């Protein structure tokens, strides 16, 4: 017989995703306490006000009641509820009072420590490990804040014991630390409690140990040979690798998995012959799922490629996979575009286990130029797989996946996305591309999000103050009316009478920034992100104390830029911008600073919402429009894009509760609550399958609207982007170049592509007719020049450019004998001359977009020569004005346009290979020219240094190559660099720096290497 108090929760709570309406009152009370702490941190009043004492007593009663039952799995939800309550009532209070508010007391006597301890233990007792990990990190933060106090050692040992309990270790000293303290006894032994506090802890700890939910057993821990044999894997090296991987999982504290990650069981989806679709909300652990598939593939001695939409995500994923596999001697690198592919992606026992992270475009370039290079790939993971529905990028991804399946039929594909409305499209795509597939799909979020609107509203004292109206707890629907919303009212922030939504958002975030609440403000234009960051910093300059910025990070920025970065100016006051016009190093530093709590506010464009995981407490979307620099107009954001930006608040394992606000301009004909209800369609729109077209079907649309069937199109490439034209030309030539009946060949091949199976017969017939005509025109225009046709098929580049390249190479029989720099200079001249010949073409006009070709090439040469960014900006005449707008234009060119220009050097190398494959091999600079242009280097030494230090510090790579070039002698360059880095990490006095800034920059790069 249970207590009446517990009995009502047994009847009312079904699971963590659906709270019974009768239980909403309790959730209102805990949320009111959470918002009360939030409000106090930002100097805002709240309505309703939470009664922390009453909620705490109620939570302790529930805790006591749970301690009196055997605790079968039906109580998992109640444990979650109690853990939620203790975390919401205590986490923010503990965070903002961790150092000063309490007299020094031991952990067992600390109220905030005790509350978070109970939150952690209840989460673990209910099996909610993701939420528990977030609380552990809060406790670790508290321990660090108190480590220098009189009880510092106790807090440190307690935090270590909690980590051991979460990780499934037998005791807190299982990782090599000292014998258990009192906390080790409380959590791991049958310890006789001395008081009520210890009793609560030991009681819950025993329940956690009794669960025995160590899911590593489900991955074969202890019987790896038998587990792998069930998957057809019997090789001793595979068994040894899998054993090592499971041990590394234990060391990393990953000893069990969520229901969403397990799905119907590892035996269902973690197989060697099944594709995988993963559609889980952001923060649900998709990366770990992809990691498990990766590990199983690596165990078989096959390579893995991860495809990600942005370089920022490539860098983030590379770091995460490197942490997972580096101890197992797995190479984890960004995918290069050089002959390095040859040893990395081939079959054979002598080949190393390798994981490459790449954008789709880089992988497409590899497959076009050297399809045999991927013959050893056993798995392709596409993260943010919704990019299949994005214009030419979706086309690139589909072509890559289909081509990989043709080259390596046994290669598995894993599609991972957090966008629910794309799941049906992605499942259909995966089914059609062939092979058996399994889904892992859930809409249950591991984080709790409080949605609402930010507006200027109120009566009396609230008049013209920023007010956040929040939807109350409970199941919300699109067409309901809100009753009793929660309010956050900023007290000391005045607003003009007719404030815009973006201005309102800026004022609100500026007021929040001093509090330490980690906030992201989404803004519609890149230049405004910097201006708003500068504005917020200026407001804080009068009252806030300047923050210390890591000297190594500042040094890296100064070396790379040659000037002061906006980050350095604004970061001193806790705020920084983030947008696509920043250098990759600047973007990386912003992300690093928010993780390390150096800053707490980021002003960003929507690019930050594309999968980069950062621990924000609050996200504010200032506008539902986005500025399109090409059309010079604003365009509406989609429902998914808005939710994705809002969803940056709350990160599983770091931040359990996120507040997500949409800034709106108040319609005076509506009350504030009516305004809240109008916005319901953006927050609670029911699931609807997306009607978007995926991949190649979008390219079909281009083919049917651009004049691709007339001969002149091959000269002008009008009506399509250059990448789309490349894909079309490559596509038709790869299918019909040697076909007796091109139309029949096109039909047969096109029907293999998943997205094209959606086409009607009429649309398919029209497309085939137009593409067959395009193929005929290509053959006619090339006059059956076999070498020109090969170059077209491998690059898809403009025909006139390729003709010029081939003629230039034919007229340069000694090309392969030229010294490296002369070979590169020759390539520069040929590429520039070829482009100048095409200045009247429409594709050229679209590529240059008003830029002067000479200035573009001067910028490329300066970039490649290792000139700091300021030197490029000073010579950049595109803007007409200096400052931030000019810096952003240069940044966008280098980030987005430069890789397109670099393809011309790559096409020249392909032409050279076609004409003289034996003469342009080995250490040829020409084969590396595309990589040199894109990465900003001009020698192998510089490229290898850049790779070794993480691809971000271009100028530093030039400096290090110059300082060490004479030291290398005949030693292999990669071995030499590894030796130098290891030497400098162990003895920093040997670092060859000419200045303090240079020394700090090298130290900063080394520290990130670990």
Image (tube, grey):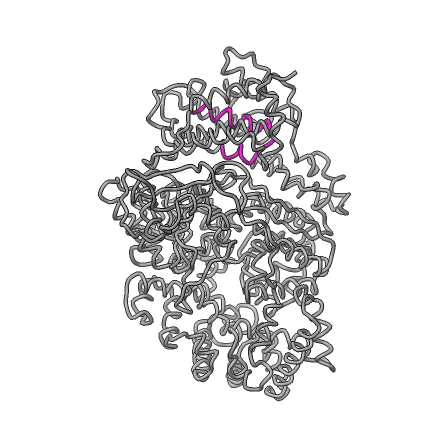
Q: Which residue is drawn at 39% across and 60% down?
A: 581
- Snapshot quadrant of residue 93: top left
- Residue furthest toward the left? 542
Q: Quadrant of the N terminus?
A: top right
Rendered position, 792 above or below 465 = below
Q: Main secondary structure of the magenta part?
A: helix
- In this view, the residue in front, 516 or 156, is 516
Report x, y in % for residue 692: 59, 62
Q: Does the magenta stretch include residue 798?
A: no
Q: Which of 977 and 6 is in front in this view?
A: 6
Say which quarter of the image contains residue 186: top right
What residue appears at the point 64 percent right and 38 percent down from the top-left corner? 259
In the image, residue 172 sits, relative to residue 669, either above or below, namely: above
Residue range corresponding to the magenta coloring:
112-135
Image coordinates of residue 487 in percent, x first then y, are: 39, 37
Residue at (57, 14) in percent of width and height: 191
Which residue: 57% across, 65% down? Answer: 339
Percent coordinates x, y for residue 902 in the rendering: 47, 70
Residue 599 visible in rendering: yes
Q: Does the magenta stretch include residue 126?
A: yes
- Residue 939 sits in quarter: bottom left
């Amino acid at each position: 017989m249970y207590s009446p108090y517990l009995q009502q929760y047994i009847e009312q709570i079904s699971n963590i995703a659906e709270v019974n309406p009768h239980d909403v009152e309790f959730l209102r009370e805990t949320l009111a306490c959470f918002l009360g702490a939030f409000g106090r941190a930002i100097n805002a009043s709240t309505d309703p006000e939470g009664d922390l004492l009453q909620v705490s007593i109620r939570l302790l009663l529930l805790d006591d009641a749970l301690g009196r039952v055997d605790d079968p799995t039906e109580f998992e939800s109640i444990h979650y509820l109690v853990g939620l309550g203790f975390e919401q009532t205590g986490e923010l209070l503990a965070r903002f009072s961790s150092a000063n508010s309490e007299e020094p007391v031991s952990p067992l006597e600390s109220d905030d420590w005790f509350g978070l301890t109970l939150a952690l233990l209840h989460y673990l007792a209910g099996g909610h490990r993701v939420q528990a990990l977030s609380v552990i990190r809060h406790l670790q933060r508290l321990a660090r804040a108190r480590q220098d106090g009189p009880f510092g050692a106790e807090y440190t040992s307690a935090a270590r014991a909690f980590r051991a309990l979460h990780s499934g270790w037998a005791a807190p000293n299982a990782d090599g630390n000292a014998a258990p303290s009192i906390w080790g006894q409380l959590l791991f032994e049958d310890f006789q409690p001395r008081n009520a506090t210890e009793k609560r802890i030991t009681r819950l700890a025993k329940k956690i140990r009794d669960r025995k939910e160590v899911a590593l057993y489900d991955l074969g821990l202890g019987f790896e040979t038998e587990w792998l044999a069930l998957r057809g894997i019997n090789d001793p090296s595979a068994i040894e690798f899998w054993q090592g991987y499971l041990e590394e999982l234990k060391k990393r504290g990953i000893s069990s998995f969520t229901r969403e990650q397990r799905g119907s069981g590892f035996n269902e989806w973690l197989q060697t012959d099944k594709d995988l679709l993963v559609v889980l909300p952001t923060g649900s652990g998709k990366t770990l799922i992809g990691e498990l598939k990766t590990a199983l593939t690596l165990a078989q001695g096959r390579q893995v490629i991860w495809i990600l939409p942005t370089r920022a995500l490539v860098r983030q994923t590379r770091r995460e996979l490197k942490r997972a596999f580096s101890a197992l001697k797995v190479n984890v690198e960004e995918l290069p575009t050089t002959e390095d592919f040859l040893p990395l992606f081939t079959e054979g026992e002598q080949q190393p286990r390798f994981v490459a992270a790449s954008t789709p475009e880089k992988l497409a370039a590899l497959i076009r130029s050297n399809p045999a290079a991927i013959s050893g790939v056993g798995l392709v993971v596409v993260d943010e797989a919704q990019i299949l529905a994005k214009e030419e990028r979706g086309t690139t991804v589909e072509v890559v996946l289909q081509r990989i399946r043709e080259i390596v039929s046994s290669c598995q594909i894993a599609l991972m996305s957090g966008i629910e409305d794309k799941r049906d499209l992605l499942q259909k795509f995966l089914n059609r591309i062939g092979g058996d597939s399994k889904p892992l799909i859930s809409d249950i979020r591991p984080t709790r999000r409080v949605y609402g609107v930010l507006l200027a509203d109120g009566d009396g004292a609230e008049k013209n103050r920023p007010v956040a109206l929040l939807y109350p707890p409970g199941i919300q629907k699109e067409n309901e009316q809100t009753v009793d919303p929660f309010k956050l009212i900023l007290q000391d922030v005045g607003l003009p009478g007719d404030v815009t939504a973006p201005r309102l958002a800026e004022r609100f975030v500026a007021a929040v920034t001093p509090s330490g609440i980690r906030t992201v403000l989404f803004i519609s234009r890149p230049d405004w992100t910097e201006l708003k960051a500068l504005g917020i910093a200026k407001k804080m300059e009068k009252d806030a104390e300047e923050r210390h910025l890591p000297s190594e990070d500042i040094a890296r920025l100064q070396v790379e830029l040659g000037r002061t970065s906006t980050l350095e100016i604004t970061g001193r006051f806790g705020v920084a911008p983030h947008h696509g016009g920043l250098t990759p190093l600047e973007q990386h530093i912003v992300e690093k600073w928010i993780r390390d709590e150096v800053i707490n506010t980021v002003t960003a464009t929507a690019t930050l919402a594309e999968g980069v995981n950062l621990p924000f407490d609050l996200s504010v979307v200032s506008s539902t429009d986005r500025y399109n620099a090409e059309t010079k107009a604003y365009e509406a954001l989609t429902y998914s894009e808005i939710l994705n930006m809002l969803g940056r608040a709350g990160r599983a394992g770091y931040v359990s509760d996120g507040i997500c606000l949409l800034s709106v301009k108040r319609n005076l004909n509506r009350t504030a609550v009516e305004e809240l209800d109008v916005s319901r369609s953006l927050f609670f729109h029911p699931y609807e399958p997306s009607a978007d077209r995926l991949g190649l079907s979008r390219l079909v649309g281009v083919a049917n609207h651009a004049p691709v069937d007339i001969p002149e199109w091959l000269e002008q490439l009008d009506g399509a982007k250059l990448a789309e034209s490349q894909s079309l030309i490559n596509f038709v030539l790869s299918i019909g170049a040697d076909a007796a009946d091109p139309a029949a060949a096109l039909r047969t091949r096109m029907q293999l592509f998943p997205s094209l199976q959606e086409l009607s017969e009429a649309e398919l017939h029209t497309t085939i007719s137009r593409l067959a005509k395009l193929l005929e025109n290509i053959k006619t225009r090339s006059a059956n020049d076999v070498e020109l046709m090969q170059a077209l098929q491998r690059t898809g580049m403009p025909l006139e450019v390729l003709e010029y390249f081939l003629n230039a190479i034919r007229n340069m029989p000694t090309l392969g004998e030229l010294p490296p720099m002369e070979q590169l200079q020759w390539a520069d001249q040929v590429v520039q001359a070829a482009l100048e010949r095409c200045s009247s073409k429409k594709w050229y006009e679209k590529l240059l977009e008003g830029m002067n070709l000479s200035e573009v090439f001067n910028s490329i040469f300066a970039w490649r020569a290792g000139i700091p960014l300021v030197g490029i900006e000073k010579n950049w005449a595109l803007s007409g004005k200096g400052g931030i707008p000019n810096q952003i234009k240069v940044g966008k060119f280098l980030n987005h346009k430069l890789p397109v220009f670099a393809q011309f050097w790559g096409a020249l190398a392909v032409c050279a290979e076609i004409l003289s494959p034996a003469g342009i091999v080995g250490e040829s600079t020409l084969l590396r020219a595309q990589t040199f242009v894109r990465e900003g280097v001009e020698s192998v030494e510089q490229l290898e240094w850049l790779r070794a230090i993480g691809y971000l510090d271009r100028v530093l790579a030039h400096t290090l190559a110059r300082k060490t070039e004479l030291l290398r002698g005949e030693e292999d360059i990669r071995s030499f660099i590894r030796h130098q880095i290891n030497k400098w990490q162990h003895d920093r006095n040997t670092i060859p720096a000419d200045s303090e800034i240079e020394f700090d920059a090298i130290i900063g790069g080394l520290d990130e290497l670990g």
